[in-house]
Image: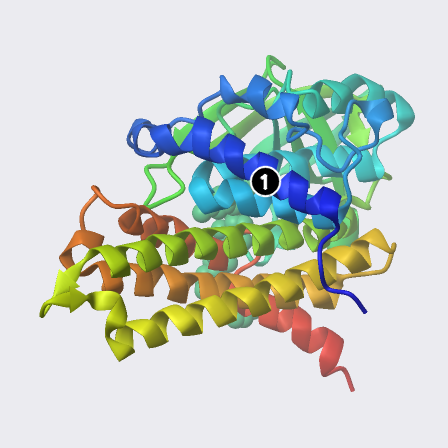
């Protein structure tokens, strides 16, 4: 067993880190205030392969591994977790669903523009009354000749208001419950598709989050994604992989919060010495550094199992649960180490603290990760 990254992976980390420091760092607070995903970044991300990180070159992707994907996501989140959330949702949810379950024709038509950064993808599973219990969704799709007519409202959708296409899960046969849910690709501009309320959020504000309203939205049968009735099962498979991305995002965010606290601890002097020489401050830094390393290893383990083609339901849930929970600790300790300066917007600690809470909620809350893990470990 060798847990070191390869030279190429270290190089990848350096190049994404330099990009994030140069292109993202100076604008982090401006984008946070604007509450808008900076769409001009798509072309810049695409140059680095970040819009189609894991997809094969034949679909315009960068053909990187799942471990490489984690490195890219970590380095973006270390600087701007909210812009990173958009990259993770695009790659790991909307585009991934098309890559994993789309036909060749769907991949050529929809995945190529996504992977090359010409278009942005959204993914709509959640509804107002169907969050953790997503299978209780009310959105329906009814077959009408060669078309499907989709009606319902999706809640909390990343890029819901701005994406070029949305992958939407809808009930096609209510009697079959979760086995009666199917997925559809819906393009922006389709009659009946519109953005609803845009959320005014605590954190992750540069990643816009909106309702997606589907009012008798008619799509041809060729836009059914995957087999009819398999949409929910496929969504869970997408989430198994997507959760590795949120684990990596948590590790990167925690790393950024830790580094900011570490450098502040050696700048700030009280009682005639840097606060970083006080034992209780050192203990916080050391404990966070140790937890971040453990989270990173759990995340890379899940990613390398995915690369080996193995099922990762358990490992992805463990990585997501642990990494997000320790990221919350790292961001909170970051504010504490900054004292009053952690509570104001002049230092990055405040934004990490706001952004981090999404990691224990999105793509399955911590409680749901524990349910997933229990189902794998504690089945009788
Ligand atoms: C910024 C943001 C971006 C998002 N992006 C997307 C997106 O792009 N696409 C998408 O489809 N969704 C998206 N979501 C939705 C997200 O996945 C849901 O918010 C999440 O799954 C939780 O659902 P909920 O908010 O309805 O909470 P609820 O399910 O109502 O949960 C409320 C509380 O009850 C707990 N709980 C629920 N069930 C159980 C149980 N069985 N056992 C123990 N505790 C339980 C939960 O853990 C939580 O603490 C996004 C959310 C946010 C905030």
Q: Residue 87, can we see it?
A: yes
The secondary element bearing badge 1 is classed as helix
Q: What residue lies at 52% left-to-right and 61% top-to-bottom?
A: 365
Furthest-right residue in this view = 104
Residue beneath the point at 77% across and 33% down: 98
Judge left or right: residue 199 versus residue 347: right
Label 1 environment density (alpha carbons within 10 Å; few <14, some 14–19, many ≥20) = some
Residue 218: x percent and y percent? 69, 19
- Tell me which residue sits at (74%, 42%) in the image: 8
The image shows residue 67, relative to residue 265, as above or below, that is: above
Q: Is mark 1 within 8 Å of ligand 1?
A: no
- Residues 296 and 209: in front is 296
Nearest the viewer among 196 and 26 is 26
What residue appears at the point 54 percent right and 43 percent down from the top-left corner? 75
- The residue lying toward the viewer, choosing from 307 and 184, is 307
Q: Position of residue 255 (x, y in %)?
A: 46, 55
Q: Inspect this view and state whether residue 238 appears.
A: no
Residue under pointer 1: 14
């Amino acid at each position: 067993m060798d847990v070191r990254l390869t030279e190429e992976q270290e190089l990848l980390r350096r190049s994404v880190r330099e990009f994030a420091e140069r292109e993202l760092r100076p604008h982090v607070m401006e984008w946070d205030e604007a509450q808008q995903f900076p769409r001009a970044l798509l072309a810049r991300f695409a140059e680095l392969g970040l819009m189609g990180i894991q997809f094969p070159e034949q679909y315009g992707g960068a053909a990187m591994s799942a471990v490489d994907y984690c490195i890219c996501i970590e380095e973006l989140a270390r600087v701007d977790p909210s812009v990173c959330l958009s990259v993770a949702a695009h790659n790991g949810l909307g585009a991934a669903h098309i890559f994993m379950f789309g036909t060749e024709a769907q991949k050529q038509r929809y995945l190529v523009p996504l992977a090359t950064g010409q278009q942005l993808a959204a993914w709509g599973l959640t509804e107002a009354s169907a969050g953790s219990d997503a299978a209780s969704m009310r959105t329906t799709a009814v077959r009408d000749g060669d078309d499907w007519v989709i009606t319902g409202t999706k809640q909390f959708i990343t890029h819901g208001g701005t994406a070029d296409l949305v992958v939407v899960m809808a009930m096609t046969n209510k009697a079959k419950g979760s086995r009666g849910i199917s997925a559809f690709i819906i393009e922006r501009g389709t009659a009946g598709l519109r953005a609803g309320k845009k959320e005014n959020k605590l954190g992750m504000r540069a990643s816009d989050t909106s309702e997606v309203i589907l009012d008798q939205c008619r799509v041809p049968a060729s836009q059914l994604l995957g087999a009819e009735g398999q949409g929910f099962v496929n969504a869970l498979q997408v989430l198994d992989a997507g959760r590795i991305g949120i684990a990596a995002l948590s590790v990167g965010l925690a790393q950024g919060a830790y580094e900011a606290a570490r450098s502040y601890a050696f700048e700030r002097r009280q009682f005639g010495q840097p606060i970083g020489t006080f034992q209780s401050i050192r203990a916080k830094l050391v404990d966070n550094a140790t937890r971040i390393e453990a989270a990173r290893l759990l995340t890379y383990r899940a990613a390398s199992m995915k690369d080996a083609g193995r099922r990762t339901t358990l490992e992805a849930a463990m990585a997501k649960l642990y990494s997000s929970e320790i990221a919350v600790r790292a961001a909170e300790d970051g504010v504490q180490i900054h004292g009053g300066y952690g509570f104001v917007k002049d230092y990055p600690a405040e934004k990490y603290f706001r952004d981090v809470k999404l990691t224990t909620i999105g793509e399955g809350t911590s409680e749901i990760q524990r349910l997933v893990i229990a189902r794998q470990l504690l089945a009788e």
